[in-house]
Image (cartoon, rainbow, N blue to C red):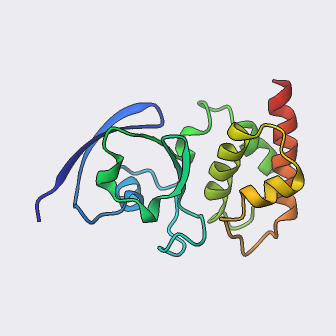
Amino acid sequence: MAGVAVLTTINGDNVEYLCQPDETLLDVLRDRLGLTGAKEGCGTGDCGACSIILDDRLVCSCLVLGAEAEGRRVETIEGMAHGDRLHPLQQKFLEHAALQCGVCTPGFLIAAKDLLAKNPDPTEEEIRFGLAGNLCRCTGYDKIVRAVQDAASVMKGA
């Protein structure tokens, strides 16, 4: 099977890669590009562990083909921090102990980033709805919601 050449932007950098026509973007990110933050939890788009932002839209990268990223903008968890400076969401997840095993954390952070980009002052209900596509088996959701609320407050003041 011949490979497909793809030119895209990932976390602000121009990236070119070859992938198989049936290869998921999740597999490309992890196996070809070494961006292992997005996790495969279910492979069916039900858990949110592989969430990324594709052209300003939250998607499960297990449901997108690597070839579909051609000419598009991809944001992953690896692009969230700026050097050693954590994004406010990352900092608040740490402060609120909103993570345990870490499998779901990158997906929650990306989903929260997408939510706050579209709604910088969400209610608790809007946060819970915005994160509903992400599943966590360890923490429960209250600490995650509080971390997002706190980050929203910090980001509004910045």
The quarter of the picture where residue 125 lies is bottom right
46 relative to 11, above or below: below
Rendered residue at 82%/65% (across/down): 141
Asked if residue 46 lies left or right of residue 22, the reply is right
Percent x, y for residue 1? 11, 66
44 relative to 95, above or below: below
Count of marks, rendered view: 0
| Front residue of 21 and 142 | 21
| Front residue of 49 and 22 | 22
Percent x, y for residue 89? 74, 43
Rendered residue at 83%/29% (across/down): 156
Percent x, y for residue 82? 61, 30
Q: Can residue 97 be seen in this snapshot? A: no
Rendered residue at 58%/72% (across/down): 46
Q: Can residue 13 be seen in this snapshot? A: yes
Asked if residue 122 lies left or right of residue 47, the reply is right
